[in-house]
């Protein structure tokens, strides 16, 4: 297509998405882009806006379910070094949206900066964590965020200050196409004590989640005052299987993907769970996975 002119060095057609996604299933993207710097990214986004081409941002892929038939438009994978820098500035850290959340947490703990250690073990990128306000143990990343640099769907770069930012349970006001970077303000603490706290959270989290990493996913948001895992277990669906996808017997809010599984299996299992919970308890579970 004409819109690819000059972009061929980082845009590919009909790219398999499964290798980039935590669940390892799903159809291909119509176009797949891996820009290496912000100028390429901006040019691509502007071109897509001009052509009215659908565009999506892919980070760590831990919260994405790609449909079996594939994803139309352009999927941008922001994994290049230019989008993943982490820089400590006193009690503040500037982190690229493409940086792994795990790297941010370990950097902060090693430098004696407290506030994010309870996020250990949460997969994905800093950008994804900010967009969905990732949290655990009563702490979320939004509590530390004082500034974010974003790119809109027209390619414009903006800075969102603390007055512009709003964070709530698994939601934020950072709904632009790309979170390029964020500034986080943390508390100076003893690195050894932070490491001990982080290790404790890690041990507890691993005991309550499937041992596998790839091929697993957390499906629903926890309703206020409840755990989705407890609700699913209460209605008798722990261990339920649809095709190659099964409700985890360790944590019922996780699914595990087996050989031959498809995205359609996941969607059918989600519908089954939601229907049973509504029928039995009169509750509507909200899906956490983004379905593309």
Image (spheres, grey):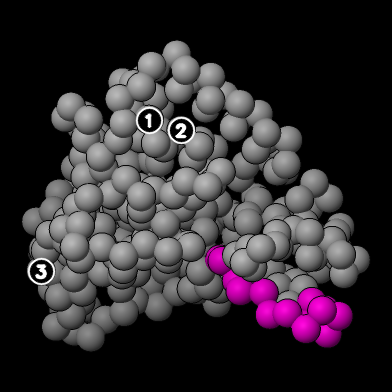
In what quadrant of the picture does the N terminus appear? bottom left
Q: State the extent of the magenta-drawn residues as a range.
A: 276-289
Q: Is residue 165 above or below residue 38?
A: below
Q: Is residue 124 above or below residue 285?
A: above
Location of mark 3 (residue): 156
Other residues around mark 3 within 10 Å, as few (<14) / some (14–19) / many (≥20): few
Report if residue 4 lies within the magenta region: no
Q: Element under label 2?
A: helix
User: SS of the residue at dot 3?
Assistant: loop
Q: Which residue is mark 2?
A: 117
Cα distance in 3D space between marks 2 and 3: 33 Å
User: What is the x, y in percent for residue 209?
Assistant: 70, 43
Q: Nearer the viewer, residue 163 or 260?
A: 163
Front disc: 2 or 3: 2
Per the image, the residue denoted by label 1 is: 114
Q: Do the residues under discs 1 and 2 have CB atoms within 8 angstroms?
A: yes
Residue 8 visible in this rendered orientation of the protein: no
Mark 2 or mark 3: which comes first in sequence?
Answer: 2
Label 1 CA crowd tier, 10 Å (few <14, some 14–19, many 20+): many
């Amino acid at each position: 297509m004409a819109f690819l002119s000059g972009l061929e060095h980082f845009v590919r057609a009909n790219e398999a998405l499964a290798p980039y996604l935590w669940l390892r299933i799903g159809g291909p993207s119509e176009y797949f882009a891996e820009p290496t710097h912000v100028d390429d990214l901006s040019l691509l986004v502007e071109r897509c806006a001009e052509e009215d081409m659908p565009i999506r941002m892919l980070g760590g892929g831990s919260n994405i379910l790609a449909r079996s038939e594939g994803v139309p438009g352009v999927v941008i994978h922001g994994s290049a070094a230019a989008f993943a820098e982490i820089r400590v500035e006193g009690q503040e850290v500037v982190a690229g949206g493409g940086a792994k959340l795990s790297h941010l947490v370990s950097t902060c703990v090693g430098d004696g900066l407290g506030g994010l250690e309870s996020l250990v073990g949460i997969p994905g990128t800093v950008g994804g964590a900010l967009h969905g306000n990732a949290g655990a143990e009563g702490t979320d990343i939004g509590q530390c965020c004082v500034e974010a640099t974003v790119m809109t769907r027209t390619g414009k770069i903006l800075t969102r200050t603390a007055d512009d930012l709003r964070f709530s349970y698994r939601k934020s006001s950072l709904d632009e196409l790309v979170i390029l970077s964020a500034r986080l303000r943390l508390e100076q603490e003893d690195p050894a004590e932070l490491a001990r706290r982080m290790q404790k959270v890690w041990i507890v989290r691993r005991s309550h989640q499937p041992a596998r990493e790839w091929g697993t996913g957390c499906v629903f948001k926890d309703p206020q005052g409840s755990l989705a895992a407890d609700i699913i277990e209460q209605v008798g669906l722990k261990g339920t299987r649809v095709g190659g996808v099964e409700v985890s017997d360790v944590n019922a809010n996780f699914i595990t993907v087996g050989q031959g599984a498809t995205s359609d299996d996941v969607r059918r299992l989600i519908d089954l769970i939601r229907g049973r919970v509504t029928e039995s308890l009169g509750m509507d579970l909200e899906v956490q996975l983004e379905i593309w």
